[in-house]
Each structure stands twice: as structure tokens, then as C-alpha cells.
């Protein structure tokens, strides 16, 4: 496992499991399988309605001999009308996860009340209940404006990031603050069959790797954390097996050239 150090010196696995749509018994089972594979970072959200399942999977792993500190648990908050409401929302997530601390808590998107929500997060961070705090889906303009009001600079900004939208301007804007870019949907949720791209497939063949593995390797070599989502154990294993090769400079340049800097999702506002 490779780790990356956040701007507050907290270490986080550079790859984790995205848990969107992993709900109920089957979702919990998938999370437990991911633990068996070696995943230690899990990304959840209030919006996903699966924090209880994640908490149960972690609890079972701990009963089996693992330690709480073996895991990096990340979740995201929905909007709240005030700082006090946000504090109650954080407590709700802690209860759902059945945890005393959360390793990373993010605001799910740029809400109208994001600044008030973040104040609540800063308060819990100072108490040590939140080990790191950040944001999600904040484009360059939203990020630049938001950090002006932050006492604690966001450690993470989780955004749509993949070969066709590599977020180069945003990454550059966050560089001075050392806010980490974390990629959701690195395979574009199957849109446009990016994994069938002939250029990508050709490069993957040269390394005896799959297109998915090359995508993930390309991103982490740019210092971008990744949270690919899957419910299938063999895909978890495939996605996790990216630390035994490195891309050469020519291939990285070719893959970098696929960037269009355009979102593949209608609801984003970068």
C-alpha cells in the first residue's frame, strides 16, 4: 500500500474503495471483501445511505483482530442550514458509522451554507474527533473563494477526475495550499467506454496490465488519490494491483494529452 501525506501531516492510503450504491447486506459484504483484498481507505457519504454498513464492516474486521487505526474512514456531509445543524449532522454520521472519530470528513458539494458547515467541521477537528477535513466538487473558482474564509485549509478536494478531465488548472490552484486532489469515478462511471480507448489499451498491453490499472497508475503518479468503486472482488483486486509498475515519460505524456478538461456528468459545475 502506498500512502500520501495530507497538509496536516495525516497519512492516507492513495487508493481506497468508493462505496456509492453499496448498500444493505450485499454492500456490507462487498466492503468486507475489500478489506480482505487489502483496502484500508473507504469513502462513504450521508447521501449514499450506507454509513451503517461501512461501520458494521469495520466493526467485524476489528472483532477479527484488526485495529481501528488500520483504517482510514472518509465520509461526506449533506447540506445543513446552520453551524449548529451541521454539528448535529456530524454527530449523526459518527453514530451511523459507530465510530468515535472520522479520518476525513468532506462537504459533499458547494452548498449555499458551506462556510457555516465548515465552521462546524473546524470545531470537531480542533477536538480531535475529525482527523482531517475537506471539500468535494469545489471547482477552481469555488475552491479559491472558499479557502479565503477557512481557518483550517481543506486537506482534500474530491472531484471528478479521470483521463478526459484531469483537473490540471484546479490542481495547480490548490498547490500552494497543499490541498490534495482526490478522484471520484476515475473510470467515468463507464461513460464513453473510456476503458476501450485504443490508445489506452495499447499502452496497457505494453505493461501487461489492464486499461483500468493504467488509468489508476497514471492518476496516482500525478499525486492524485483514487477511490474506484466496484462491488466485485476480482475488480477490487485488479484495481488494487497497481504498485508493481511505473509508466514511462512518453506514455504519461500521451495519456496527459487525452485531457479535454470537460466534465462527463450533467450535474457538475466546475
Image: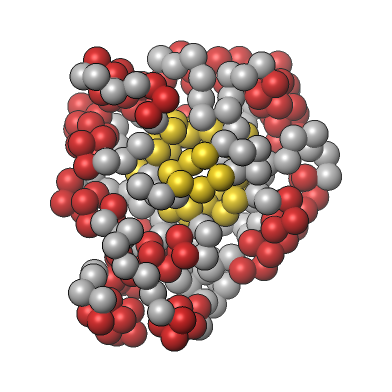
Relative to 95, residue 139 above or below: below
| Residue located at (35% from left, 47% from top) | 1
Q: Is residue 192 visible?
A: no
What colouring does the structure picture have? secondary structure
| Residue located at (65% from left, 24% from top) | 125
Residue 83 x, y percent position in the rendering: 73, 21
Q: Is residue 66 left or right of residue 75?
A: left
Residue 94 x, y percent position in the rendering: 49, 17
Relative to 98, residue 152 above or below: below
| Residue located at (39% from left, 30% from top) | 71
In the image shown, does 110 or 28 lie closer to the viewer?
28
Residue 91 x, y percent position in the rendering: 55, 15
Residue 165 x, y percent position in the rendering: 52, 69
Q: Quadrant of residue 121?
A: top right
Q: Is residue 236 left or right of residue 21?
A: left
Q: In the current view of this chain or complex, which residue is farthest to the right? A: 148
Q: Quadrant of residue 132?
A: top right
Q: Quadrant of residue 89?
A: top right
Q: Quadrant of the C terminus?
A: bottom right
Relative to 263, residue 38 above or below: above
Q: Is residue 194 visible?
A: yes
| Residue located at (56% from left, 45% from top) | 5
Q: Is residue 158 left or right of residue 226?
A: right
Q: How many marks?
A: 0
Amino acid at each position: 500500500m502506498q500512502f500520501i501525506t495530507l497538509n496536516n501531516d495525516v497519512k492516507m492510503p492513495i487508493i481506497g474503495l468508493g462505496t456509492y450504491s453499496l448498500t444493505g447486506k450485499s454492500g456490507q459484504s462487498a466492503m468486507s471483501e475489500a478489506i480482505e483484498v487489502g483496502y484500508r481507505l473507504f469513502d462513504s457519504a450521508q447521501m449514499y445511505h450506507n454509513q451503517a454498513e461501512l461501520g458494521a464492516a469495520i466493526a467485524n474486521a476489528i472483532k477479527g483482530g484488526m485495529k481501528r487505526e488500520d483504517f482510514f474512514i472518509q465520509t461526506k456531509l449533506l447540506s445543513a442550514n446552520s453551524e449548529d445543524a451541521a454539528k448535529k449532522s456530524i454527530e449523526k454520521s459518527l453514530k451511523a458509522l459507530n465510530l468515535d472519530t472520522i479520518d476525513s470528513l468532506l462537504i459533499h458539494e458547494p452548498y449555499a451554507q458551506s462556510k457555516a458547515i465548515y465552521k462546524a467541521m473546524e470545531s470537531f477537528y480542533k477536538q480531535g474527533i475529525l482527523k482531517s477535513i475537506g471539500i468535494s466538487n469545489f471547482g477552481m473558482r469555488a475552491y479559491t473563494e472558499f479557502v479565503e474564509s477557512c481557518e483550517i485549509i481543506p486537506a482534500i478536494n474530491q472531484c471528478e477526475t479521470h483521463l478526459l478531465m484531469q483537473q490540471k488548472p484546479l490542481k495547480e490552484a490548490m498547490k500552494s495550499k497543499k490541498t490534495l486532489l482526490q478522484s471520484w469515478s476515475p473510470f467515468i462511471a463507464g461513460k464513453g467506454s473510456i476503458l476501450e480507448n485504443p490508445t489506452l489499451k495499447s499502452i496497457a498491453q505494453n505493461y501487461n496490465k489492464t486499461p483500468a490499472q493504467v488509468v489508476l497508475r497514471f492518476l496516482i503518479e500525478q499525486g492524485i488519490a483514487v477511490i474506484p468503486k466496484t462491488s466485485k472482488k476480482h475488480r477490487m483486486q485488479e484495481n488494487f494491483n497497481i504498485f508493481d509498475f511505473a509508466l514511462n515519460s512518453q506514455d504519461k505524456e500521451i495519456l496527459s494529452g487525452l485531457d479535454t478538461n470537460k466534465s462527463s456528468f450533467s450535474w457538475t459545475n466546475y
